[in-house]
Image: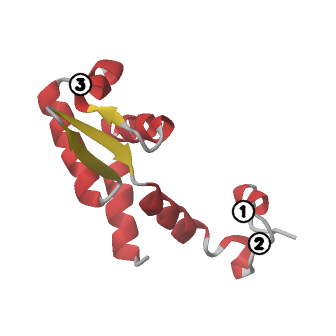
Amino acid sequence: METKNAVTLLAALAQETRLSIYRLLVQQGSEGMAVGQIGERLGVANATLSFHLKELTHAGLLKARQEGRFIYYSANYDQMNTLLGYLTENCCRGEPCATDAEVASCDGACQ
């Protein structure tokens, strides 16, 4: 991942409502949620919700699919994992960490 792409993703998440939407959808798994359910759960008006969903989708953090009259959004886990990999690629002073658990707890001095 290039730095420019990481900045785009982080900028999309650097807003309270968008971060709440994204965290909710990460919890929902690959099935995601219908737009109306997202709005109800977070108490966000439709027009505002539509704007934020568009921003997150444009950044590549969400996927949308239509089923009948409903649009469902879900987190793009591949994009999330790519961003996490970019953010942690220099963990442990640039040395590879042996396990995912070490990466998760890396304080710059993995064994």
**Rounded to the nearest whole Å, what is the CA distance between mark 3 and mark 2?**
42 Å
**Horizontal side, residue 26 vs residue 105: left or right:** left
Task: Please tell me in which quadrant of the rendered image residue 110 appears.
Answer: bottom right
Classed neighbour count for the residue bearing mark 3: other residues with Cα under 10 Å, few (<14), some (14–19), many (≥20): some
Q: Nearer the viewer, mark 3 or mark 1?
A: 3
Q: Nearer the viewer, mark 3 or mark 2?
A: 3
- Amino acid type at circle 1 is Val
Residue 64 in the image, given as x and y percentages of width and height: 26, 47
Q: Which mark is residue 70?
A: none
Quadrant including the C terminus: bottom right
Query: Judging from the image, what secondary structure is the residue with disc 3 in?
Result: helix
Q: Earlier in the sequence, mark 2 or mark 1?
A: 2
Residue 85 in the image, given as x and y percentages of width and height: 56, 68
**Horizontal side, residue 63 vs residue 48: left or right:** right
Residue in view at x 36 percent, y 65 percent: 7
Residue 61 in the image: above or below residue 86: above
**Horizontal side, residue 35 vs residue 7: left or right:** left
- Judging by the rendered image, the residue that carries numbered circle 2 is 97
- Amino acid type at circle 3 is Gly
- Judging by the rendered image, the residue that carries numbered circle 1 is 103
Quadrant including the N terminus: bottom left
**Rounded to the nearest whole Å, what is the CA distance between mark 3 and mark 1?**
37 Å
Residue 3 in the image: above or below residue 82: below
Residue in view at x 15 percent, y 27 percent: 46
- Amino acid type at circle 2 is Cys
- Judging by the rendered image, the residue that carries numbered circle 3 is 36
Verify CB contact (< 8 Å) between mark 2 and mark 1.
yes
**Rounded to the nearest whole Å, what is the CA distance between mark 2 and mark 1?**
6 Å
Query: Judging from the image, what secondary structure is the residue with disc 1 in?
Result: helix
